[in-house]
Amino acid sequence: MSDDAIHDDSMNDNSMNDDLMNDDLMNDDLINDNLMHENVTCQEALREVPAGLFGRTLNAMQPDVDMNKIAGSHDILFICLDTLRYDVAAEEEAKGTTPVLNRYGPWEKCQAPGNFTYPSHHAMFAGFLPCPYDAKSIADRQPLFFPVNAGMGKRAPAGAFGFSGATIMEGLEKAGYDTWCVGGVAFFDKRSDLGRVFPGYFRHSYWNPSFACPVKDSTRNQVDFLLKKIEKADRSIPVFLYLNIDAIHYPNYFYLDGAVHDSLESHGAALRYVDGQLGRLFERWKSVRGSTFVICCSDHGTCYGEDGCQFHGINHPAVTTVPYKHFTL
């Protein structure tokens, strides 16, 4: 599998028509002083979350990791196990059938940022990762990344990496990172306009039909590609990698011998397959690249008939409850 087969040509400058960014589209009347109430100061306009509420986060207990120390000193791998349900992840963990992921601590039960890939990823790429399941407000989050222009004030909570720009990737690029995306599900298929949105957030983005959901060895193919890529990468430049693993997504029945339909059982079998592939990635990445911080989570779950519900894109607990963990290799 060559780099040429999975290139960023779709994101070249020619694909951005200057007319789309024409100043005529930004009418000065939209930001006219007359629309700013005279009693609203510039400082107040920057804050949309109640100061008293968000102040709890700023003064919360010390986090278990300081991303300001991680940023610049570590590669960062953000691995999304697309569609993985929390209950299935916890069950496989308890049975000891996911030894690679188990090595790095238990799954945390969390609320998903959205109920399918597209909204979840917009939230996560802006720094809003899955939050604790028992969270009652935004103040109960303990963010790794903090967007300083999101109406929550300019001061990042303890341990959070404060960034300007639209995404954590943009913020990390300003801090010297190279940013890579290796896609899986159709929202990363750069053959379509929709599939070029998320890859466009990264300096380098890759997708190949062999990475797609219906391919039984999709995760192996993604890992094989990355193992070749890291051998050629400049080791003096830190890397932020986003990897969208889609093996657990529909269809997954072929990971369970004899199955003809997706089920909770095949969902778990797909996770076991993924776990086996991640071991190769983690071992080689650490060996070649050194210190590495990993964020591993799901973007949403899915339904297999619970309460008459199927698939995802709906607000069922099986969809909105996801596993999360972070750790250092």
Image: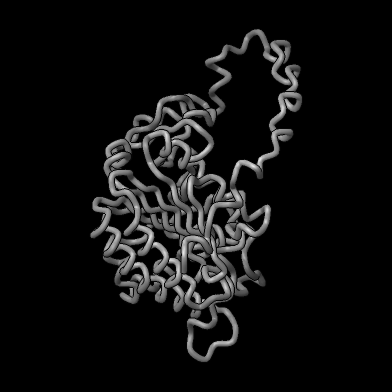
Image point (29%, 52%), residue name: 292
Residue 87 seen anywhere in this rendered image of the structure: no
Q: Is residue 78 left or right of residue 44?
A: left
Residue 25, image quadrant: top right
Residue 311 sits above or below residue 154 on the image: below
61 or 150: nearer the viewer = 150
Residue extending farthest to the bottom is: 258
Image point (32%, 44%), residue name: 237
Residue 90 sits above or below residue 192 on the image: below
Colour scheme: one colour
Q: Position of residue 221 (x, y in %)?
A: 45, 71
Q: Is residue 162 left or right of residue 12?
A: left
Image point (73%, 17%), residue name: 28
Residue 169 seen anywhere in this rendered image of the structure: yes
Residue 53 sits above or below residue 87 on the image: above
Q: Position of residue 123 (x, y in %)?
A: 54, 45
Q: Position of residue 151 (x, y in %)?
A: 54, 28
120 or 213: nearer the viewer = 213
User: For the image shown, how many numbered marks are present on the structure?
Assistant: 0
308 or 35: nearer the viewer = 35
Residue 35, image quadrant: top right
Residue 284 sits above or below residue 36 on the image: below
